[in-house]
Image (cartoon, rainbow, N blue to C red):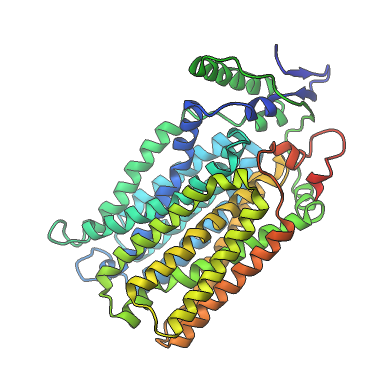
C-alpha cells in the first residue's frame, strides 16, 4: 500500500517516505551510495597533498612551468581555497533549488575538467586559473554530497557512514604522498611529465566515480518537498524491493508520517532567518566546531614539514613519509570511532573528541618545548592528536548537515564549510606561517597552544549545545520548513 497521500490541490502530502528510508537495513544499494558519492573525498585528499608535495619540482628548471615554490604553496593554494569557498556557496544554493543529483554530477564534472586542464598547464596564469576552478568544483561537492548521503542513509547508520566518508580524505592524502614520491622520481619520469601524471591519475579515478555515481538516485526527501512525490515513491519502492530480495525478509512497517506543504523553492531570506534566528544555538555550535578544527589542523599540518626539517634535520624529500603516517592516523579515527557517534551519542563523542585532541596537543607542545621528542616521537604524538581530531572534524560536517531543516541543508553545509575553509586556508596559514617559520621553539609551541585552545573551546561548546541526533530521523531533528504543525521541542533547541 503506498505511503504517500496527496490532497486534491496537489500541494499537500501526508507521507511515510522518510520513515521508510530510515527503517531499511544495510544493503548493497547503500554501498553503491557510499562508493558513488563518498569516494570523491579520496580525490580531494589526493589533489591537495600532491600539489603540496610537487611544489619544489614545479619550481625547478625543466618542469615545463615558469613558477616558484612560493607561488605554488602561496598564491595557488590561496586560489584553491578561494575557489572552494565560493564554489560551496554557489553550488550549495543550487543544490537546494535544483536537487542533489544534478549538482553532484555537475560539480564532479567541473572538478574533473579543471584537474585535467591543470595537468596541461603551460604558464603560471593557466595553473592559477584551473587551481581556482578545481577548488570551485570540490567546494560544491561538499554541499551536494553530504546532503545526499544524510538523506539516503538510514538514521541507524548515518553518523558512522558520514564520519568515515569525510575521513576518507586522508586515504587520498596517503595516496598523494606516496604517489608524489614515485611520480617525482626523475629516474622513472622526466621532470616535466611526472607532476602532470599525478593530476591525470586523479582524472582517471574521477571518471570511474562519475560512472558509478550515475546509478545513485535523487534524494526522495528533496523530490517530496519539491512536488515530485510520484518520483520519490517510485525510487523508495524500488529500493524496498531490492532490499527484500537481498535479505529474503519482508520489511517492518514504517513508524510515523509527516505532512508536507510542497513548495518549489524557499527564499534566501527565510533560509537566513531559519539558520540565524530559529536555530541560532545550532549556528553557534557549527561556527565553533568548524573554527576549532580548522585552527588545530593548521597548527599541525601547515608547518609540519618545516618543523621536521628545521628542528630535526629531516631531509625535505623524506617528509612525505611522515605525512603518510599522519594521514593514516587521521583516517583511523573516524573509522574506529564512527560507530560510537551512533551508539554513545553525538554530544558525548563530539565534545570528547574535540577536548581530547586539544588536550593531547597541549601535551605535545609541552614535550616539544622541553626537547623531549624527536621526529619519530613527535609524529607519533601528532598521530594521537589527529586520531581524535579527525573524528571530531568529520563530525562537524555531520552536525551541520543534520541539525538544520531539509530546505536549508545544502546551503547550511556550504556556509559552514566556506567559513571553516576560509579560516583554515587563509587566517590559519597567515598566523602559523609566521610562528612555525621563525625557527624558534617558543613560537612553534605557541602555534600548538593556539590550535589546542580553540579546539578545547569548541569541545566545551559542544558539551552544552550539541544536538542528540543519533538514530533519529532528520525530520525529527529539524522539522522541514514545509511541514505543517509546530516543530518538536527538541528540534527548536
416 over 309 or under it: above or below? above
Q: Quadrant of residue 96?
A: top right
Question: Horizontally, is 137 left or right of 185 in the view?
Answer: right
Work out whether residue 348 or residue 264 is closer to the camera in this orientation and state it. Answer: 348
Of 205 and 388, nearer the camera is 388
At x 50% / y 53%, what residue is drawn?
136
Q: Is residue 47 above or below residue 19?
A: below
How far from the left and from the top, in percent, is residue 167?
A: 48, 51
Task: Tell me what residue is drawn at x 75 percent, y 42 percent.
Answer: 478
Q: Residue 201: x, y in percent?
A: 30, 47
Q: Position of residue 192 (x, y in %)?
A: 21, 60
Q: Residue furthest top?
A: 1
Residue 470: percent from left, percent from top = 66, 43
The residue most toward the left is 187
Identify the residue shown where x is 34% and y is 45%. Answer: 203
| Camera-side residue of 234 and 168 | 168
Q: Quadrant of residue 208?
A: top left
Amino acid at each position: 500500500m503506498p505511503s504517500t497521500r496527496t490532497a486534491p490541490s496537489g500541494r499537500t502530502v501526508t507521507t511515510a517516505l522518510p520513515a521508510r528510508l530510515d527503517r531499511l537495513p544495510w544493503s548493497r544499494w547503500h554501498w553503491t551510495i557510499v562508493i558513488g558519492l563518498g569516494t570523491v573525498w579520496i580525490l580531494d585528499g589526493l589533489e591537495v597533498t600532491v600539489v603540496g608535495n610537487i611544489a619544489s619540482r614545479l619550481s625547478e628548471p625543466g618542469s615545463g612551468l615558469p613558477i616558484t615554490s612560493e607561488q605554488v604553496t602561496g598564491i595557488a593554494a590561496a586560489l584553491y581555497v578561494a575557489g572552494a569557498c565560493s564554489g560551496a556557496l554557489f553550488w550549495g544554493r543550487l543544490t537546494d533549488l535544483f536537487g542533489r543529483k544534478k549538482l553532484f554530477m555537475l560539480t564532479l564534472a567541473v572538478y574533473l575538467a579543471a584537474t585535467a586542464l591543470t595537468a596541461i598547464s603551460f604558464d603560471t596564469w593557466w595553473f592559477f586559473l584551473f587551481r581556482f576552478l578545481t577548488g570551485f568544483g570540490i567546494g560544491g561537492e561538499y554541499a551536494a554530497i553530504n546532503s545526499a548521503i544524510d538523506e539516503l542513509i538510514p538514521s541507524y547508520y548515518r553518523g558512522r557512514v558520514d564520519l568515515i566518508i569525510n575521513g576518507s580524505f586522508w586515504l587520498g592524502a596517503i595516496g598523494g604522498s606516496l604517489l608524489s614520491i614515485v611520480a617525482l622520481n626523475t629516474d622513472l619520469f622526466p621532470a616535466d611529465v611526472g607532476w602532470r601524471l599525478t593530476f591525470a591519475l586523479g582524472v582517471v579515478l574521477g571518471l570511474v566515480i562519475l560512472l558509478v555515481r550515475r546509478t545513485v538516485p535523487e534524494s526522495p526527501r528533496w523530490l517530496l518537498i519539491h512536488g515530485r512525490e510520484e518520483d520519490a515513491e517510485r525510487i523508495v519502492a524500488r529500493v524496498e524491493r531490492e532490499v527484500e530480495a537481498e535479505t529474503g525478509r519482508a520489511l517492518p512497517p514504517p513508524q510515523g508520517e509527516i505532512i508536507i506543504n510542497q513548495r518549489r523553492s524557499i527564499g534566501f531570506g527565510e533560509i537566513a532567518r531559519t539558520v540565524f534566528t530559529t536555530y541560532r544555538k545550532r549556528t553557534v555550535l557549527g561556527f565553533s566546531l568548524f573554527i576549532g578544527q580548522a585552527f588545530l589542523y593548521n597548527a599541525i599540518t601547515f608547518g609540519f614539514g618545516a618543523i621536521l626539517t628545521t628542528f630535526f634535520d629531516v631531509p625535505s624529500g623524506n617528509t612525505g613519509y611522515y605525512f603518510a603516517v599522519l594521514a593514516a592516523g587521521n583516517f583511523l579515527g573516524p573509522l574506529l570511532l564512527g560507530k560510537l557517534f551512533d551508539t554513545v551519542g553525538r554530544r558525548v563523542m563530539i565534545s570528547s573528541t574535540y577536548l581530547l585532541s586539544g588536550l593531547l596537543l597541549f601535551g605535545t607542545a609541552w614535550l616539544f618545548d622541553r626537547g623531549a621528542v624527536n621526529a619519530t616521537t613527535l609524529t607519533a604524538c601528532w598521530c594521537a592528536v589527529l586520531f581524535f581530531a579527525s573524528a571530531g572534524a568529520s563530525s562537524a560536517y555531520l552536525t551541520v548537515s543534520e541539525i538544520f531543516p531539509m530546505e536549508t541543508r545544502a546551503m547550511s553545509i556550504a556556509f559552514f564549510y566556506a567559513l571553516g575553509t576560509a579560516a583554515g586556508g587563509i587566517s590559519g596559514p597567515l598566523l602559523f606561517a609566521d610562528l612555525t617559520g621563525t625557527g624558534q621553539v617558543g613560537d612553534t609551541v605557541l602555534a600548538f597552544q593556539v590550535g589546542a585552545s580553540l579546539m578545547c573551546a569548541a569541545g566545551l561548546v559542544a558539551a552544552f549545545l550539541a544536538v542528540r541526533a543519533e538514530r533519529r530521523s532528520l525530520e525529527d531533528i529539524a522539522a522541514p520548513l514545509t511541514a505543517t504543525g509546530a516543530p518538536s521541542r527538541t528540534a527548536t533547541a
